[in-house]
């Protein structure tokens, strides 16, 4: 059994769940049994639709240590099956106490974006463009096996080996801001692009996130403009991306998905954890950078719309960006992670040798 601890919802979006879904699918393809562990039922129906089992912890995702007793009870129900179990956590709210508690029962892995060095884990994955070994200097904690860099970007199979061609005439733009768009950035970008003389006549495909409270605004723009197309619950995201000439996106997993296909990206950030990602892409010179909404506000919107106009007029620049992005991500990262996770099963005896018991309360 591979237990995957991740959450999604209106406040935190779907990023954690989507990348774990990709890893879970790769594990299933290897014959592994998967079960998601969720704080609440916000994404339960989504996971069920995708064919994954889950358990609800009825906890506060921001206070994970409070769920340890409940988690212990769920694991006890599995009985002898925990002998070959592995635990993967993907949350910004994991603590050292939480991970040490789980590790008393099984090997643990962690999906990291922040350069965490305080966790006792057996495998740590940071697939981001900025991930380097210097982030994880040895300290008092266990030195984990590190899987670093875009080679391990956990993308769904649909993003592997997708044919893409840069067209001479650029007419279609994809706009995506994640599962929850608290500042209505998709709406702001779209509205300004429709008023700008160099971008007003382009076709706009806008992904409406599952927890976007500004959906009515987007739908109203769609009614008023024939060149605006709003998509919800997209089943074939790679296909939607492939038909676009460029994409406007916030920093996050979507940037790696677009990279695997080769769609030129205009990126921006609106939360702190996105900044390192967009900065990494910007530093390599492979994307136009729109800015940081928290610092720039409306001026960021104008920067993005201007960048759309520039890319529209320059097919050579779009070709350069596309080629560099495809060199960055190959779409096989989820399978590489799945291979290493299944390999953790043999270290159970090593954990016991460390003096950490495998029975009793967490």
Image: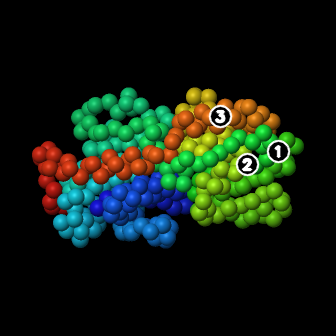
Q: Secondary structure at mark 1?
A: loop
Q: Position of residue 353 (x, y in %)?
A: 12, 46
Q: At 73% from the left edge and 48% from the top edge, which residue is drawn?
A: 173
Q: Is residue 266 above or below residue 60?
A: above
Q: Position of residue 352 (x, y in %)?
A: 13, 49
**In-image side of 308 versus 225 (left or right):** left
**Residue under pointer 1:** 199
Q: Secondary structure at mark 2?
A: strand
Q: Is residue 69 above or below residue 342?
A: below
Q: At 65% from the left edge and 45% from the top edge, which residue is drawn?
A: 164
For the N terminus, the quadrant is: bottom left
Q: CA distance from mark 1 to mark 3?
A: 20 Å
Q: Position of residue 11 (x, y in %)?
A: 53, 58
Which one is in front in this view, the residue at disc 1 or the one at disc 3? Answer: 3
**Residue under pointer 2:** 173
For label 3, count other residues whose C-alpha is less than 10 Å away and answer few (under 14), some (14-19) or many (20+).
many
Q: At 60% from the left edge and 33% from the top edge, which residue is drawn?
A: 324
Q: Is residue 235 above or below residue 308?
A: below
Q: Earlier in the sequence, mark 3 or mark 2?
A: 2
Q: Earlier in the sequence, mark 1 or mark 3?
A: 1
In this rendered view, identify the residue nearer to me: 87 or 99. Answer: 87
In this rendered view, identify the residue nearer to me: 70 or 84. Answer: 84
For label 2, count other residues whose C-alpha is less than 10 Å away and answer few (under 14), some (14-19) or many (20+).
many
**Residue under pointer 3:** 321
Q: How many marks?
A: 3
- Residues at discs 1 and 2 in contact (Cβ within 8 Å): yes
Q: Secondary structure at mark 3?
A: helix
Q: Residue 248 is drawn in which quadrant?
A: top right
């Amino acid at each position: 059994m591979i237990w995957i601890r991740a959450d999604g919802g209106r406040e935190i979006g779907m990023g954690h769940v989507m990348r774990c879904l990709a890893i879970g699918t790769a594990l299933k393809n290897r014959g592994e049994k998967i079960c998601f562990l969720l704080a609440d039922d916000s994404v339960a129906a989504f996971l069920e639709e995708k064919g994954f089992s889950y358990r609800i912890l009825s906890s506060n995702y921001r206070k994970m240590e409070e769920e340890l007793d409940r988690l212990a009870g769920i694991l006890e129900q599995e009985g002898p099956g925990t002998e070959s179990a592995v635990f993967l956590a993907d949350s910004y709210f994991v603590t050292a106490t939480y991970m040490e508690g789980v590790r008393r029962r099984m090997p643990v892995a962690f999906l990291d974006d922040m350069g965490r060095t305080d966790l006792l884990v057996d495998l740590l994955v940071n697939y981001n463009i900025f991930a380097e070994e210097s982030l994880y200097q040895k300290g008092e904690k266990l030195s984990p096996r590190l899987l670093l860099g875009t080679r391990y970007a956990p993308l769904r199979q649909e993003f592997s080996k997708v044919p893409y061609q840069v067209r001479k005439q650029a007419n279609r733009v994809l706009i995506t801001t994640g599962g929850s768009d608290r500042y209505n950035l998709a709406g702001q970008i779209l509205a300004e692009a429709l008023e700008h003389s160099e971008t007003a006549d382009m076709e706009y495909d806008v992904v409406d996130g599952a927890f976007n409270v500004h959906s009515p605004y987007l739908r109203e723009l769609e009614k008023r403009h024939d060149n605006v197309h709003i998509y919800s619950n997209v089943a074939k995201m790679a296909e939607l991306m492939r038909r676009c000439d460029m994409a406007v996106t916030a920093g996050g997993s979507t940037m790696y998905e677009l990279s695997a296909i080769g769609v030129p990206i205009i990126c921006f950030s609106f939360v702190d954890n996105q900044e390192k990602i967009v900065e990494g892409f910007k530093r390599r010179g492979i994307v136009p950078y729109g800015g940081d909404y928290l610092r720039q506000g409306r001026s960021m919107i104008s920067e993005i719309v201007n960048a759309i106009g520039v890319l529209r007029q320059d097919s050579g620049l779009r070709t350069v960006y596309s080629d560099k992005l495809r060199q960055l991500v190959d779409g096989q990262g989820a399978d590489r992670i799945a291979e290493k996770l299944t390999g953790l099963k043999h270290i159970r005896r090593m954990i016991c040798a460390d003096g950490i018991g495998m029975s009793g309360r967490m």
